[in-house]
Image: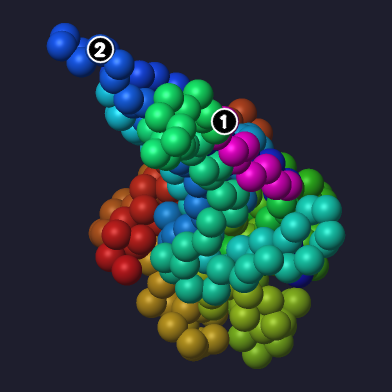
Amino acid sequence: MFIDEARIRVKAGDGGNGCMAFRREKFVPRGGPSGGDGGRGGDVIMVSSQRHNTLIHFRYNPEHKGQRGQHGMGSNCSGLDGESTILQVPVGTALYDQVTGELVHDFAEPDERLIVAKGGRGGRGNQHFATSTHQAPREHELGRAGEERAYRLELKLLADVGLVGYPNAGKSTLIARISAAKPKIADYPFTTLEPNLGVVTVGEEPNLESFVVADMPGLIEGAHLGSGLGTQFLRHIERTRLLVHLVDVSDASGRPDPIEDFKVINKELESFGNGLDQKPMIVAATKIDSANPEKLKKLAAHVKRRKLEFHAISAVTGQGIDELKWALAKRLRRFEQED
Ligand SMILES: Nc1nc2c(ncn2[C@@H]2O[C@H](COP(=O)(O)OP(=O)(O)OP(=O)(O)O)[C@@H](O)[C@H]2O)c(=O)[nH]1
Ligand SMILES: [Mg+2]
């Protein structure tokens, strides 16, 4: 189980103070009290949304405040309420009170809203304190403080993107390059025995996007029948929305024809069933720092004929990596718009 976690502090806006004032008008010698009320402080509200797949934006940004209410003013003018602050959390986020450890809410569906810190009430102005025997009240209230709380967020990560390909194609090297995951990397096949999940980010706050990539164990011919590491790992990619098919175009693969490599793996995906061969796919030629130019050319042409998106990358030099990251973000964004 892969868990993403973040700790945040939220503070709702304080209420504005009530005002003490008296009317001053021409021809009205002793005006009555006219102090307006303070505005309410803004809440901090949490909303579940499909726009986010991870909690990484909270790790960059752990403190959130509601706006304070404006103070009341003379002439019976109330201060404006403070604006609420909306925090978007991914669907599936569990919210815990950091102090008691209690589960506060489980955001199971999109668009669930919860006030996680309540804004302070505004203070009343002296206009409210006048009575028949007390016509020039000087009493007025201060605004109440906004609520302040500490929470822990927890999210079970599901992969958005699955990396598939032959053993040694460079899947683990790629995920190590684009995320904080630290998988084992080696020049022998079947280095990866269990999927590794990594959180990938592109852009910067406030436009930071993030998604989860799964580095899968290598596939070989017959994987769907249990050859190599077998079928159990294929199940992990069933839930992804997008596959990146890595094809080694250097001579390190030890196989002569990258098109054949590409077809063999596709056939395994198809044989496994469950719609794996229907998943959108981006193809990445790997190890282009030491590419065999003929192999690279052949594969690129073949992929183009199949009308699939093609990238050429080196996880060692970094060539093509940013382009691939942005391409993944863009495709995932498009799926979200279609949902
Ligand atoms: N020159 C070069 N070598 C690379 C590149 N990417 C990976 N390698 C090397 O290729 C070998 C295999 O890399 P891995 O990332 O472990 O391959 P994998 O696809 O995860 O392999 P399995 O886990 O066995 O399926 C390692 O020796 C890497 O250093 C690259 O871009 N350029
Ligand atoms: Mg690996």
Sequence-wise, which precedes: disc 1 or disc 2? 2
Q: Residue at 73%, 47% (x, y): give it.
A: 150
Would residue 29 be found to the left or right of residue 49 on screen? Answer: left
Q: Which residues are magenta?
A: 142-150
Residue 78 lies in the magenta-colored region:
no
Q: Residue at 62%, 80% (x, y): give it.
A: 235
Residue 147 lies in the magenta-colored region:
yes
Kind of residue sitting beneath label 1: Leu
Q: Secondary structure at mark 2?
A: loop
Q: Which residue is mark 1?
A: 142
Answer above or below: position of 198 versus 136.
below
Tell me, yes or no, whether the two marked residues, 1 and 2, touch with CB atoms within 8 Å: no
Q: How many numbered callouts?
A: 2
Picture quarter with the C terminus: bottom left
Question: Among all residues in the image, which is located at the extreme top?
Answer: 26
Q: Secondary structure at mark 1?
A: loop
Mark carried by residue 164: none
Q: Nearer the viewer, residue 211 or 97?
A: 97
Please tell me in which quadrant of the rendered image residue 215 appears: bottom right
Kind of residue sitting beneath label 2: Pro
Q: Which residue is mark 2?
A: 29
Picture quarter with the N terminus: bottom right
